[in-house]
Image (spheres, rainbow, N blue to C red):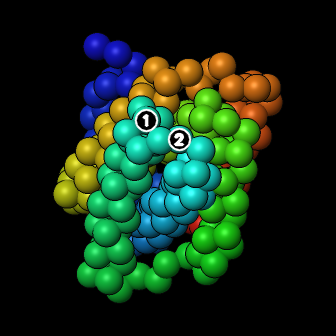
Amino acid sequence: MSEDRIPVVPPERTGEGRQPGDPSPRQIVERIIRVDQAGEYGAIRIYAGQQAVLRRRLRPGHKTRKAVELMARQEERHLKEFDRLLVERRMRPTLLQPVWHVAGFALGAATALLGEKAAMACTVAVEQVIDEHYARQAAILGDDEKPLRETIEEFRGEEIEHRDEALAQGAEQAPAYPVLSAGIKAASRLAIWLSSRF
């Protein structure tokens, strides 16, 4: 079994073992849904920025262009589910959504302007952070939130597929890959932290 698929025994209830001052189970779930909705929105904007550039540079049917289009469609499905959960549970989205609207598109367009391998490097960096993020969320959601946990695990599997596809397309051959990857990962982690709180 790969490290991507190490089984985790979930707690019976979300927030089990929490200490005084820790978020309540409701706050935990609210943060999870809010940050995941923001993340999927940001991913769609990254892919929109990449597509705006790649459509001009790559012929229809090019493998990178097709991969980005497929990934974007999957992210749209993820976003629809988190949008639904926000409404169903009467939760608000992050206040930073206008920032992610601009920042996501700019990141996608900038990496695509550096070339198709840099666009794929962006995908790898973001998806590695999201993989870790979704794994942590699935581990703290109890059986009382089993449907949400299963949704997150399903989406995590698709994010891992995106990462693997981008690696297969030469992401690591992008110019200054280690620096590019580290910068995008740091920005992604900051966006997660901010979106979960605001």
Q: Circle 1 is placed at which residue position?
A: 62
Q: Where is residue 111 drawn, in percent x and y?
A: 68, 44
What residue type is disc 2 on?
Leu
Secondary structure of residue under mark 1: loop
Residue 174 location, quadrant: top right
Image quarter hosting the N terminus: top left
- State the image coordinates of residue 163 (x, y, percent, origin top left): 46, 32
Between 51 and 180, the one lying in front of the other is 51
How packed mark 2 is, by other alpha carbons closer than 10 Å (few <14, some 14-19, many 20 or more), is some
Amino acid at the residue labelled 1? His
Image side of residue 95 versus residue 76, left or right: right
Q: Is residue 1 above or below residue 6?
A: above
Residue at 40%, 19% in the rendered image = 3
Quarter of the rendering containing residue 63: top left
- Asked whether residue 22 is in view, the answer is no
Near mark 1 (Cα within 10 A), the count class, few <14, some 14-19 or many ≥20, is: few
Residue that badge 2 annotates: 58
Q: Residue furthest front?
A: 59
For the point 56% across and 21% down, which residue is it? Answer: 170
Q: Disc 1 versus disc 2: distance between alpha carbons? A: 6 Å
The residue drawn where x is 33% and y is 24% is 6
Say which residue appears at 43% left-offset and 35% top-offset: 62
Q: Nearer the viewer, residue 32 or 154?
A: 154
